[in-house]
Amino acid sequence: MATSVDGKIGPANVDHFVAIGSRYDMEKLISLRDDADGILFGASTFRTWPKVHHGNDPKRHVHHFIMSRSLDLDFQAELFQYPEIPITIFSGSEKTTPSQIPPDHVEIVSIPDQPGQIDLILKHIARCGVESLLVEGGGHILHKFISAQVLNELYLTMVPIVIGNERAPALLGGQRLTAPPQIKIRNSRQVKDETFLHLEFKYT
């Protein structure tokens, strides 16, 4: 995740991807995808980047997982046009029938948004053969994984800008943590004006 000084991960009121970090920051993200068996993100992230989340090898087909409360997704988007890429959508309600007909290679699983949701999602992901999961966001999804005390590491890029809009998406979705984790800095690196932090989370 890349965050501004005021804790924002992107500008407000945009419907497309806007990088607040540098090209080097994006290259780091792409490299992290190389080490993952699965990539998970929310519906808002999908809408701003409705494409395949490639690593450095575009021929490597990583399982994509999307968390969506309403299933209001555009199944004509580029991401869904590759049958060789497995996609699982976790519905945050009992609903498993979207308004559009999904492609045959897309699985929809109902796991309602309630306590224990993330644990059930991770069990399903493990049954898909995924051992290393990269959570790409957004802030609401990141908050869920930290609250469930299952996020092990966070790669955080500090970008020296202030977005200054309270409606802009925040690092943790603007939500509080009832039991904040202990954080250890495993590695830090300064590249030009950006600070790259590799953080380890421990929960009590």
Image (cartoon, rainbow, N blue to C red):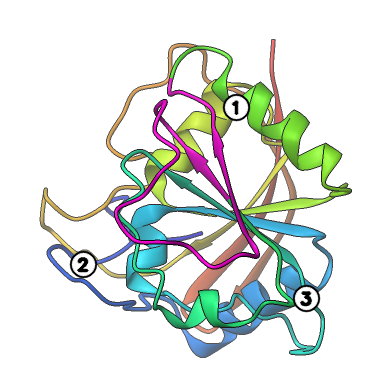
Asked whether 93 falls inside the magenta stretch, the response is: yes
Residue depicted at 41% across the width and 74% down the height:
49
Q: Nearer the viewer, residue 81 or 153?
A: 81
Q: Earlier in the sequence, mark 3 or mark 1?
A: 3
Q: Which residue is mark 1?
A: 118
Left or right of residue 134, residue 102 in this image: left
Query: Alpha-carbon neighbours of circle 2 within 10 Å: few (<14), some, or many (≥20)?
Result: some
Q: Is residue 182 visible?
A: no
On residue 11, which mark appears? 2
Estimate the spatial distance between the alpha carbons at disc 3 and disc 2, rounded to whole Å. Answer: 30 Å
* Numbered range of the magenta stretch: 89-113
Q: Amino acid at mark 2?
A: Pro
Left or right of residue 94, residue 29 in this image: right
Q: Which residue is mark 3?
A: 61
Q: Is residue 202 above or below residue 31?
A: above
Q: Is residue 98 above or below residue 57?
A: above
Q: Secondary structure at mark 2?
A: loop
